[in-house]
Amino acid sequence: MKTAYLYVRVSTDEQKRKGYSLPEQEDRLLKYCKYNNIEVKGIYREDFSAKNFNRPEWKSLFTTIKYKSPKEEANILFIKWDRFSRNVEYAYEMIGKLRKYKTTAMAIDQPVDFSVPESTVMLAVYLSVPEAENSRRAQNTANGIRRAKLMGRYTNKAPLGFINLTLLDGKKIITPKQPEAEIIKWVFHQLSKNIHKIEEIRKMATDKGLICSRSHFFRLIRNPVYCGLIPVNISAEEQQMVKGMHEALISESQFYDVQRIITTKRQVTAKADTLKATFFLRGFLICPHCNQKLSGSFSKGNTKKYPYYHCHGRCKTRINAILLNECYQNKLQELILSNNAAELFNSILEDQNMKTQKTNYLHERMLAERKLKEEGLTLSQARKLFVARI
């Protein structure tokens, strides 16, 4: 008596489109086995895509086949070849693996006699049609998504700061979600100032309540969706920006200003700013041994980096930067201006204030003269109109 393992598979989209169901397939296979006097050794039910064989139930079935008796011949029965696979390359590879364990894959609605060489032609047709169908469906889906994007609709999962909504007519849109949207506005505003580092702004945004990883944050600040634009791929190398139907969180000018800052200025100045803040006396200090100007750099320790002012000469002078900076600041606080110097500064400030006041007076005078001239022109036109009516 022949033996067989039954394999039934369905994916969610196939069930919607073609009405496939696991019980229906199972019932047909059982009737086939009963009619042909085939013993059923197991039934494996799968709810998974057939783009590859990385499926839970198939793995379980293949393990059973692998550890069965070497002398035992078995069959795997299914309804059609698209239940087995929708990829020609993987399908032929799996048929070869099953053959090693004396097992044959068979479709009851599309039978193939492997003992006849010409039957491999029909097998190729049965396997290639599902793959072509999958490719066409994927292409149609991609074209539909592209058309929707060209119309200004965002078709993917809403980015952070937005939420997906479906309108009464069935169209899907994204709309700002609070408080994330306000925090993202604040992030772009801070980035446009070019004062803080990106990582500092990310940490401040996290403190405000933005839940976002470091890598996600760097993608977020480069996403044009926040300024109302949707990127559409025209080709593999060309991309077009389309005005979206959704509400923008920031202006386009602010977005592109931020892109210019994060791709140029910050990339160059981040390390330099740290060095300037730590070694602000560099260029003013003189080595006590060789009279050369001291430079500054970090020395790597076991747990952290330590800042030092040092000499490039052979004297190898090294001074702890933190200690020297504190001593310098303490000395500055001990300095007191003399009375003559304080009077001089007061005189300079008074002169500066007088110049500022004089500039303000001249500006106000110019505005008054301009207003008088405009009023005079208005009065002259009124007189002309009055005379013309008489």
Image: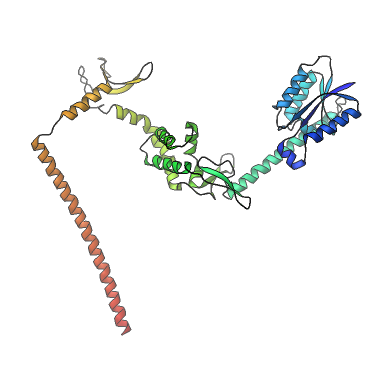
Name the spot of residue 205 as percent of width and height, x first. Answer: 43, 37
Report the quarter where the C terminus lies: bottom left
In depth, the one of 369 and 288 nearer the eye is 369
Q: Quadrant of the N terminus?
A: top right
**Residue 28 versus residue 99 in the image, above or below:** below
Q: Is residue 108 visible?
A: no
Q: Is residue 200 visible in the rendered structure shown here? A: yes
Q: In the drawing, does residue 248 fall left or right of residue 139?
A: left
**In percent of the image, x 37 and y 41: which residue is there?**
193
Residue at 45% of width from left, 41% of height from top? 184
How many dots with numbers?
0
Picture quadrant of residue 378: bottom left
Q: Residue 95: image x %, image y %? A: 78, 24
- Residue 128, located in which quarter of the rendered image? top right
| Residue at 41% in and 36% down | 264
Q: Position of residue 68 (x, y in %)?
A: 79, 16
Q: Residue 362 in the image: state x and y as whole percent.
A: 20, 57
Q: Residue furthest left?
A: 340
* Foreground residue among 201 and 301: 201
Question: Does residue 267 lie above or below 256 as drawn?
Answer: above
Residue furthest bottom as drawn: 390
The answer to which of 291 and 385 lies nearer the viewer is 385
